[in-house]
Image (cartoon, helix red, strand yellow):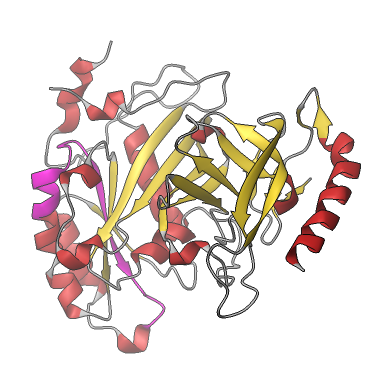
Amino acid sequence: MPSTLISSVSEARDHVYDYVFKLIVIGDCYVGKSAVASTCCSNNNQKSRWEVYVPTIGIDFKIKTVELQGKKIKLQIWDTAGQERFHTITTSYYRGAMGIMLVYDITQEKTFENIAKWLRNIQEHANEDVEKMLLGNKCDMEDKRMISKERGETIAKENGIKFMETSAKSNINVETAFMTLAEDILKKYPQKDASSSPGSIKPGEKDPGGGSGSKGCCS
Amino acid sequence: MASEQSDCAASSEANDLSSLLEDGKNAKHLKCERCGSTILRKGDAVHVKKEIFLPHMKKKSENQAPDDGETLTDFWLVKDMFTFENVGFSNTVENKKFLICADCEVGPIGCQDLADAINLYVALSRVKHE
């Protein structure tokens, strides 16, 4: 009943922004989650890290601003920061998350097998109307591929979520993936002005939780 | 040695300050010195004088202690993290979070002192003004 989706939205102040979307990135160790999180929506390819102080501390989250359908949206992106190693992704990490990027490595069979486990974890801990997306990362490493694109597509379809193959390293599809996820979250909000497409609900794209129930919670 | 450098940086900062200000706010966009990612839009931050210690951006040597840094005095103050266009937050260390570039992760460009309410500080000397 209490809709985190609505409560975690900060309304525009002085038209600085329209919405805040909290997104989290999960998946097995070494599938490139951090790389995916940091490649998201960046306009440049200078990814190599400087010898900086901060990496020794670790990054908590990032804020990135994107524009979708004339709305200024602040994406707050969280990376698990290694918690997954101990299978201790807790409810607190999922709390308030409106979008989840579930990542596996196309060169590591095990990371793909664990997708089912992650999906159960999401179901247990996350908000039921959370938007999910599956990413097969490291698609630049074609010669080491273990998981065909079709297998990724199939598991995504079975679970009613979108799928993309990405490469954080070669900057393939990562930005598109985050924009797609943000768009899917945005679709859940009633459109206030007529300029953008009125609250269209795409058939087949609904999440299994049946998130339409959240509509009644606002106002 | 390090203190000489920061003194020098501080004086050139002061000379340039007026050109960066408009009604006490930033007259220009704040961008990452390294990759050019937009950190704050113009007019979104207030200039404040405050002494804050920040670790150096560049590691000077392999065995540099993590607490090696400099005390800076000119900052852009932001009250709401979502005012930032693009920024990254480090994990908390001694009740502080450091700010980094969201794109290339260079930093710290500023910090958030969790004891100091919600105030977020970006060092003038660690960003480009465009």
Which picture quadrant has residue B124?
top right
**Residue A156, image x, y percentages:** 19, 58
| Residue found farthest to the right | B15
Measuring 23% from the left and 80% from the top, which residue is drawn there? A108
Q: Quadrant of the C terminus of chain A?
A: top left
Q: Is residue A12 above or below residue B12?
A: above
Q: Is residue A45 above or below residue A146?
A: above
Residue placed most toward the observer, B70 or B32: B70
Magenta highlight range: A120-141
**Residue B2 in magenta?**
no
Measuring 41% from the left and 60% from the top, which residue is drawn there? A58
Asked if one can make out residue A102 in the rendered structure from this viewpoint, the answer is: no
**Residue B3, image x, y percentages:** 76, 61
Asked if one can make out residue B57 in the rendered structure from this viewpoint, the answer is: yes
Q: Is B38 placed left or right of A138 in the picture? A: right
Q: Is B70 placed left or right of A86 in the picture? A: right
Residue placed most toward the observer, A153 or A17: A17
